[in-house]
Image (spheres, rainbow, N blue to C red):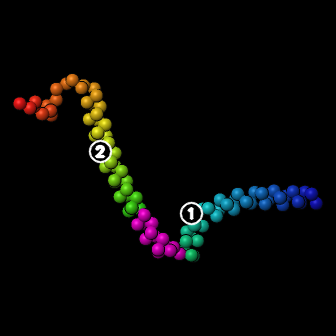
Amino acid sequence: MVLIIGFVVLLVALAIPILAIVMDSPIVRRVLEARHGTDPGTAAELRQKVELLEDQVDDLTRAIDGLREEQAFLHRLLENPDRPSSRRLPPAP
C-alpha cells in the first residue's frame, strides 16, 4: 500500500512540471489564441503605445546627441584654454 501511495505521489510530482512545460509551449498558445481570439482593441492600444515609445526614443536620442556635442566642446575648452581659437571675435576697438 505504501508503495502505491509513493508511486502516485511521484507521478503527481513529475506530472506538474511536465504539464507546465506543455501548457507554455507555442503550439498550445496558438490553439488558445485561435479558440479565444485576440481583442482588436488591445492590438490598437499596443500599436499606439509602440508609436509613443518610438517618439520618446527619438527625443532621447536627440537630447543625448546634444549632450555629446556640449561635452565635446567643454572637453576641448578645458584641454586648451589658452589656445587662440579662430571662432573668437576680434577685440573691440
Q: Is residue 86 above or below residue 23?
A: above
Nearer the observer, 90 or 60: 90
Q: Position of residue 48 (x, y in %)?
A: 40, 66
Name the residue that disc number 1 marks: 26
Q: Give the side of residue 12 with respect to residue 93, left or right.
A: right
Magenta span: 37-49
Q: Give the side of residue 82 with respect to residue 64, left or right.
A: left
Task: Give amino acid for label 1.
Answer: Pro
Task: Give amino acid for label 2.
Answer: Gly
Q: Give the side of residue 74 with respect to residue 54, left or right.
A: left
Separation of marks 1 and 2 at Cα, in angstroms: 44 Å
Which residue appears at 41% of the width and 62% of the height?
50
Which residue appears at 43% of the width and 71% of the height?
44
How crowded pointer 1 is (Cα within 10 Å; few <14, some 14-19, many 20+) is rated as few
Residue 73 in magenta?
A: no
Which residue appears at 47% of the width and 75% of the height?
40
Q: Position of residue 88 (x, y in %)?
A: 15, 32
Residue 27 location, quadrant: bottom right
Q: Give the side of residue 15 with respect to residue 22, left or right.
A: right
Q: Which mark is residue 11?
A: none
Q: Is residue 49 above or below residue 58?
A: below
Nearer the observer, 32 or 69: 69
Q: Earlier in the sequence, mark 1 or mark 2?
A: 1
How crowded pointer 2 is (Cα within 10 Å; few <14, some 14-19, many 20+) is rated as few
Q: Which mark is residue 66?
A: 2
Which residue appears at 47% of the width and 74% of the height?
41
Q: Secondary structure at mark 1?
A: helix
Q: Position of residue 23 (x, y in %)?
A: 64, 64
